[in-house]
Image (cartoon, rainbow, N blue to C red):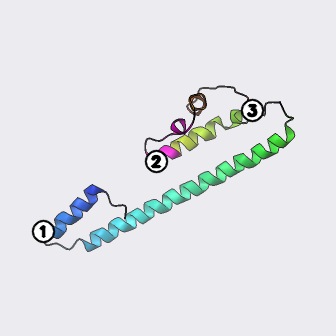
Amino acid sequence: MGFSLHELAKILRVRDAGGAPCRQVKRLLEDKLSQLDTKIADLQALRENLQTVADDWDQRLSRTPDGVQAKLLEDVAMPLAQLDSRLREHRGDVSLRDLSDRNAGNLFHGRDIDHGY
């Protein structure tokens, strides 16, 4: 149910001492639901932002002749940094750099690299 070992140990200590931690367990569950709602809202907003970028890229690519650089990543360095930050919030130590190759990772951490993307 998403309870940490620390939370479970605390609840079990109360129960083992003859207490009734039922309301405490319910509050913990409500907190988990609230945290989940926040994460879902953040991820939905992030998805909307990424969809906006994808739509923009579709338009730009349709206007870019074959063989010509569209320079798609140049305009999204800051949004990618924000995406990296949000990914770290939700996944701990995982970052975009962890999910990308080394060269793309440099862009995600603020170092400009022009590969013509």
The residue located at (57%, 43%) in the rendering is 83
**Distance in Å between CA atoms under marks 2 and 1:** 36 Å
Question: Of helix, strand and loop, which one carries label 1?
Answer: loop
Q: Earlier in the sequence, mark 1 or mark 3?
A: 1
Horizontal and vertical percent position of residue 112: 63, 26
The magenta span reads 87-100
Question: Of helix, strand and loop, which one carries label 2?
Answer: helix
**Circle 2 is placed at which residue position?**
91
Q: How dense is the environment of label 3, judged by Cα within 10 Å: few (below 14), some, or many (20 and up)?
A: some
The residue located at (65%, 54%) in the rendering is 48
The residue located at (83%, 30%) in the rendering is 67
Q: What residue type is labelled 1?
A: Ala
Horizontal and vertical percent position of residue 75: 70, 36
Tell me the quadrant of the picture where the C terminus can be found. top right
Label at residue 71: 3
Horizontal and vertical percent position of residue 30: 39, 68
